């Protein structure tokens, strides 16, 4: 998800049970394996570096990371993993993008389609929804005292947008500049909680009705719980 709800979702995952953490580790391993297909050196492969940093954030065992890299290098049985993106409309006609990694595209497509339909939405053709989003880099910075001073300092570093949320400060930048801005923020003395490439809604909408909110959240959580789903982005701000 994006906006106010994004970091909250990450935080909930970090507090997950052992069983849920096992599922998260499986998803992280898939992301590492797919990213490593573009090169196994994190210094030269930014996508792989982000995937490995996220694994570290979740305290994923080093052996799991090593195994994921070995799979990408062909040292383990290749499961034929591929990235696939789905676009559609969820409850209350919200725009949704789902990014997944799967070893069986037909199965995953059928299951994602089923979740959309059960939630009162439907899948759409490629491009029908994605034009409502833009790729962006997102960095979550730890909040300290004198938040206004923090925000002004971040703006001076040349970021595209800064927003205070409950769990930190979300910093948005051009996705091509994510690594550069991340390094600037580190050098400026900020503590970075997470950094990733995200899909940011161009015109986010707000839902005030509590019943509608709960219906949307339930739908999003069903998508996020799917074993193959890596990320879910919507144009909703809660």
Image (spheres, helix red, strand yellow):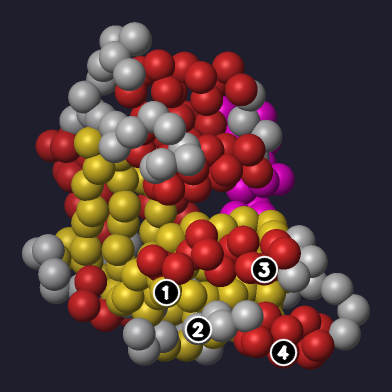
Residue highlighted by disc 4: 152
The label shown at residue 174 is 1
Asked which secondary structure carries label 4, the reply is helix
- Residue depicted at x 65% and y 87%: 156
> For the C terminus, which image quadrant?
bottom right
Sooner in the amino-acid sequence: mark 1 or mark 2: 2
Q: Quick one: 48 or 68, which is closer to the camera?
A: 48
Q: Is residue 175 visible?
A: yes
Dividing the picture into quadrants, the one containing residue 18 is top right
Residue 153 is left or right of residue 89, and the answer is right
Residue highlighted by disc 2: 160
Asked which secondary structure carries label 3, the reply is helix
Cα separation between marks 4 and 3: 12 Å
Cα separation between marks 2 and 3: 13 Å
Q: Residue 107 appears at what percent x and percent y?
A: 18, 35
Asked which secondary structure carries label 1, the reply is strand
Cα separation between marks 1 and 3: 14 Å
Q: Quick one: 135 or 128, which is closer to the camera?
A: 135
Cα separation between marks 4 and 1: 18 Å
Residues rendered magenta in the picture: 10-22
Residue 77 is left or right of residue 146, and the answer is left
- Residue depicted at x 23% and y 71%: 130
Sooner in the amino-acid sequence: mark 4 or mark 1: 4
Q: Residue 61 appears at what percent x and percent y?
A: 63, 24
Residue 149 is left or right of residue 115, and the answer is right
- Mark 3 Cα within 10 Å, few/some/many (few <14, many 20+)? many
Residue highlighted by disc 3: 185
């Amino acid at each position: 998800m994006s906006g106010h709800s994004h970091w909250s979702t990450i935080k909930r995952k970090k507090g997950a049970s052992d069983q849920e953490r096992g599922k998260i580790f499986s998803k992280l391993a898939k992301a590492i394996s797919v990213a490593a297909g573009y090169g196994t050196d994190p210094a030269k492969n930014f996508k792989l570096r982000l995937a490995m940093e996220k694994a570290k954030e979740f305290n994923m065992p080093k052996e799991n990371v090593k195994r994921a890299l070995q799979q990408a290098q062909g040292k383990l049985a290749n499961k034929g993993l591929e990235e696939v993106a789905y676009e559609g409309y969820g409850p209350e006609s919200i725009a949704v993008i789902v990014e997944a990694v799967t070893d069986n595209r037909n199965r995953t497509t059928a299951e994602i389609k089923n979740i959309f339909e059960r939630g009162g939405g439907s899948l759409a053709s490629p491009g029908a929804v994605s034009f409502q989003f833009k790729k962006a880099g997102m960095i979550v910075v730890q909040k300290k005292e004198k938040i206004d001073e923090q925000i002004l300092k971040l703006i001076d570093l040349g970021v595209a947008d800064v927003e205070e949320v409950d769990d930190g400060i979300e910093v948005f930048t051009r996705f091509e500049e994510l690594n550069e801005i991340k390094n600037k923020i580190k050098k400026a003395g900020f503590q970075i909680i997470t950094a990733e490439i995200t899909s940011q809604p161009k015109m986010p909408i707000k839902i005030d009705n509590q019943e509608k909110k709960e219906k949307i959240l339930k739908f999003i959580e069903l998508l996020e719980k799917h074993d193959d789903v890596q990320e879910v982005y919507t144009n909703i701000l809660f």
